[in-house]
Image (cartoon, coloured by chain):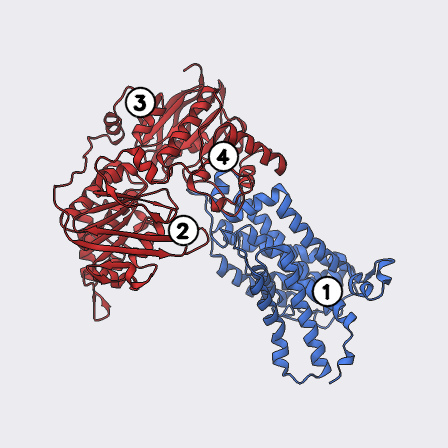
Chain colours: A red, B blue
């Protein structure tokens, strides 16, 4: 670490009812990879948006290269050499790669020259990319390359990366890190936001930890254990989920040659998926986003119907049944998107509890809704899963992501299903809530339910799965025992690095 | 029945005239929708343009001033829509429908005292030399200037969307307004400008009806042209040249069925009257392959 590139002094930003950042100060050196860590809602996003000119701080100041830095909008930030790769990609599906990149540049060259520059830079950093392809057709890893190259074309001094690895395979992560190391060697500073501790320990040389909007710690991640960092983030000691030993029983769910066409233009077709799940077993399904996860959940939950024999529960063919009939048969599902798919955001928790619980909890009598029973069921879920809310009359939207996720998963678990299908159970959920959700899933499995857990978080799958399989372009690999599976083996099951190559410059 | 009374050259020439109001209005709406806004108030903006243009022309005697006033009138009414949907975040469908009803009422109010007056003539320009070419001359090169303005508008919009930076930004805003905002583009400003452009074009289209096609003022005289313009934008998959084909098809079948009626063909008038709508929708549905702009009709608020 040499000179200081960016210095933050006492940044404070308050929104009505919540202080997002409170007196945040730290410095980023030239050519330093600086980690910014914290739970969801700790104020990381607000802080980087401030640096990128999307948010103006209430008080405090920033210095860039010794000069006062007050970006009024992202353009000004980009002009000063600050570039950002977003967590939820800021890309336009219907436009091609070159157009997407041009949109992120101040003075883009003519399209022909730009395409040549894209090829040149992508080659230099080992991130191959065809400028003419439509972004909607790209994989998540390729989409991220578009974002990174968009930044690199502007020779940034500071590159902000918000959770860059959440959608990548382990091999892709490795290649990304090589690219970042080249950038570091060239003198570019990187502000790296993540809550994946091992990544931070391999990549970063300095870390700032935020909690409730305040800086609660600084450390050198290479010298600090992951557990210590996690506890700094959470502010308490962490509970690691445990599974009581038990034997897997009879086959409950059989998926037999499940094939289905892609439901929409940017969807994925399912190709001949076959697997059995037994009583008390957790089948973990990994895979990079967009490889058929949503389609598989839809085919299992009944949102998408298939041939009758493709999905079988307890010997009964249910492929042609809708979601409520499948719930009656014992299959409950919790899709990935909690706002708008798993829950109706503007409806109360009681109404949301009623929507999937009606069949198994007998909440409908003679065609009429049994409100007292529905309310009791919602309260039961709230209590059992420690959902922080004033009461079941509150709208689902008013809950934080973690709390709503606990409610949505709890609602399915409390129905005591024979089979539970869940997609991304802890996506965007803080570590403490994630641990309690995982524990609940394990407890359910011990009680005899067959669980199918689809996730992109490989650490999560390794923690809770008995067997592991990977989805790759709509195909499922044969499941393997999760115990003893190394991260490299998992990476190969996920399909490895999709036509990525290691950077071939030594800078 | 006497088909000999139908002159194919006149038929094709009047097709270009019949299609022009729809081309103008639909071109504007195409830009609005590519920016991600669904303005169903085209009919209301057209009729407002029709009456403001008519009043200005009758008062000043100049159709050019009339067209300018129509563009201002249409854009002014569209600002109301823009304010409601972009700043007060009202529902675009409901606001657009209300705008149509409001425009119809407002124009009837403004038009009191103008019923039955004839507008000063808007002279055709016979383009020298080429308008004398047999057949092609009278069909293509012997129209009033607004016919060429409409064609130029389509070409200009095509070029703007395909090649210009501003066009790319406009498409980006329509495709994913969250991402455009994150990159620092002013979503609301761009949309307001697009809405005003759409209003101005719809106003021109309306004025073309009251100043050239009819040319006098009657309440509700746009008679659904705005709705056809809206439908053509969708069925043309938001592409300018397809939009031109759709508008010409509609104009062509309209003129043809009027001629057939005049010739006394033995098909009930009601079927003939519905034929342009059916033909246009059928052909454009068969052609359509495009995808709507990703953020079309969604409310944007920079709160995330």
Question: Which numbered disc, 2 or 3, marks the residue closer to the eye?
Answer: 2
The image quadrant that residue A285 belongs to is top left
Measuring from the top left, give residue B268's x and y in whole percent: 63, 83
Observer-nearest of B56 and A311:
A311
Q: Are the residues at dot 2 and dot 3 in contact (C-beta closer than 8 Å)?
A: no
Disc sitting over residue B16 in the figure: 1
Taking A45 as reference, is A134 above or below it? below
Query: How many neighbours does mark 3 have within 10 angstroms: few (below 14), some (14-19), or many (20 or more)?
Result: many
Q: Are the residues at dot 4 and dot 2 in contact (C-beta closer than 8 Å)?
A: no
Mark 3, residue position: A221
Residues tagged by mark 1 and mark 2 found on one chain of the structure: no
Residue that appears at 19% across and 30% down: A237
Query: How many neighbours does mark 4 have within 10 angstroms: few (below 14), some (14-19), or many (20 or more)?
Result: many
Residues tagged by mark 4 and mark 2 found on one chain of the structure: yes
Measuring from the top left, give residue B67's x and y in whole percent: 72, 58
The image quadrant that residue B66 belongs to is bottom right
Mark 2, residue position: A268
Disc 3 and disc 4: Cα gap in Å? Answer: 31 Å
Sequence-wise, the earlier of marks 2 and 3 is 3
Instruction: Tell me the subunit letter for badge 4.
Output: A
Disc 2 and disc 3: Cα gap in Å? Answer: 39 Å
Q: Secondary structure at mark 4?
A: loop
Q: Are the residues at dot 3 and dot 4 in contact (C-beta closer than 8 Å)?
A: no
Mark 4, residue position: A128
Residue A73 visible from this viewpoint: no
Measuring from the top left, give residue B217's x and y in whole percent: 70, 69
Question: Which numbered disc, 3 or 4, marks the residue closer to the eye?
Answer: 4
Question: Which numbered disc, 1 or 2, marks the residue closer to the eye?
Answer: 2
Q: Secondary structure at mark 2?
A: loop
- Describe residue A72's horizontal placement relative to residue A226 as left or right: right
């Amino acid at each position: 670490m040499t000179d200081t590139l960016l210095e933050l002094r006492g940044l404070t930003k308050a929104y009505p009812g919540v202080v997002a950042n409170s007196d945040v100060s730290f410095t980023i050196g030239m050519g330093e990879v600086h980690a910014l860590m914290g739970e969801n809602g700790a104020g990381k996003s607000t802080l980087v948006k401030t640096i990128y000119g999307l948010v103006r701080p209430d008080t405090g100041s920033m210095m860039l290269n010794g000069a006062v830095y007050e970006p009024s909008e992202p353009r000004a930030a980009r002009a000063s050499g600050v570039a950002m790769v977003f967590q939820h990609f800021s890309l336009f599906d219907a436009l091609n790669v070159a157009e997407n990149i041009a949109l992120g540049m101040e003075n883009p060259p003519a399209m022909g020259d730009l395409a040549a520059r894209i090829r040149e830079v992508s080659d230099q950093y080992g991130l191959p990319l065809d400028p003419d392809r439509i972004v909607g057709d790209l994989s998540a890893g390729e989409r991220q390359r578009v974002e990174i190259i968009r930044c690199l074309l502007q020779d940034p001094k500071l590159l902000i990366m918000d959770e860059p690895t959440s959608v990548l395979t382990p091999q892709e992560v490795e290649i990304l890190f090589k690219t970042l190391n080249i950038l570091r060697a060239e003198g570019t500073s990187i502000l790296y936001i993540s809550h994946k501790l091992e990544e931070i320990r391999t990549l970063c040389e300095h870390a700032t930890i935020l909690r409730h909007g305040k800086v609660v710690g600084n450390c050198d991640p290479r010298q600090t254990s992951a557990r210590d960092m996690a506890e700094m983030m959470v502010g308490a000691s962490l509970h690691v989920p445990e599974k009581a030993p038990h034997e897997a029983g009879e086959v409950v769910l059989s998926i037999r040659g499940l094939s289905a066409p892609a439901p929409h233009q940017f969807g994925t077709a399912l190709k001949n998926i076959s697997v059995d799940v037994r009583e008390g077993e957790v089948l973990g399904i990994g895979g990079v986003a967009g490889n058929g996860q949503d389609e598989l959940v839809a085919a299992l939950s009944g949102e998408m119907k298939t041939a009758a024999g493709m999905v079988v529960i307890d010997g009964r063919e249910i492929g042609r049944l809708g979601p409520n009939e499948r719930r009656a048969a014992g299959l409950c599902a919790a899709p990935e998107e909690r706002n708008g798919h798993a829950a109706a955001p503007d409806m109360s928790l009681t109404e949301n509890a009623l929507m999937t619980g009606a069949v198994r909890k007998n909440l409908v009598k003679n065609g009429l809704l049994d409100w007292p029973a529905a309310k009791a069921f919602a309260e039961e879920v709230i209590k059992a899963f420690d959902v922080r809310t004033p009461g079941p009359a509150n709208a689902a939207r008013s809950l934080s992501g973690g709390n709503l996720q606990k409610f949505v998963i709890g609602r399915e678990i409390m129905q005591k299903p024979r089979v539970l299908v869940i997609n991304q159970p802890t996506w965007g959920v803080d570590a403490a809530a994630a641990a309690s959700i995982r524990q609940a899933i394990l407890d359910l499995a011990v009680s005899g339910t067959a669980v199918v857990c689809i996730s992109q978080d490989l650490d999560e799958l390794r923690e809770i799965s008995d067997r592991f399989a990977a989805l790759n372009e709509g195909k499922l690999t044969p499941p393997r025992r999760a115990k003893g599976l190394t991260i490299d083996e998992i990476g190969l099951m996920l399909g490895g690095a999709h036509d990525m190559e290691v950077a071939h410059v030594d800078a | 029945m006497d088909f000999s009374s139908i002159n194919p050259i006149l038929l094709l020439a009047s097709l270009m005239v019949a299609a022009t109001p729809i081309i103008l209005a639909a071109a504007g709406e195409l830009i609005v929708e590519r920016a991600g806004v669904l303005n169903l108030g085209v009919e209301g903006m057209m009729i407002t343009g029709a009456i403001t243009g008519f009043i200005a022309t009758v008062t000043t005697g100049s159709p050019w001033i009339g067209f300018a006033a129509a563009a201002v009138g249409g854009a002014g009414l569209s600002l109301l829509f823009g304010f409601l949907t972009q700043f007060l975040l009202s529902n675009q469908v409901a606001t657009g429908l209300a705008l149509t009803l409001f425009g119809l009422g407002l124009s009837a109010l403004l038009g009191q005292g103008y019923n039955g007056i004839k507008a000063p003539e808007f002279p055709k320009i016979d383009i020298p030399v080429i308008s004398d070419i047999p057949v092609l001359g009278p069909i293509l090169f012997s129209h009033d200037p607004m016919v060429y303005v409409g064609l130029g508008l389509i070409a200009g919009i095509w070029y703007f969307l395909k090649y210009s930076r501003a066009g790319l930004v406009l498409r980006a805003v329509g495709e994913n307004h969250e991402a455009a905002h994150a990159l620092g583009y002013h979503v609301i400003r761009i949309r307001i400008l697009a809405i005003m452009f759409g209003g101005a074009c719809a106003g021109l289209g309306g004025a073309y009806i009251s100043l050239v096609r009819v040319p006098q003022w009657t309440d509700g005289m746009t008679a659904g042209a705005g709705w056809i313009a809206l439908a053509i934008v969708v069925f043309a998959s938001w592409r300018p040249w397809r939009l031109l084909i759709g508008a010409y098809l509609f104009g062509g079948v309209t003129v043809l069925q009027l001629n057939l009626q005049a010739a006394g063909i033995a098909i009930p008038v009601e079927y003939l009257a519905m034929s342009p709508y059916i033909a246009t929708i059928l052909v454009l549905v068969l052609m359509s392959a495009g995808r709507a702009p990703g953020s079309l009709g969604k409310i944007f608020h920079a709160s995330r």
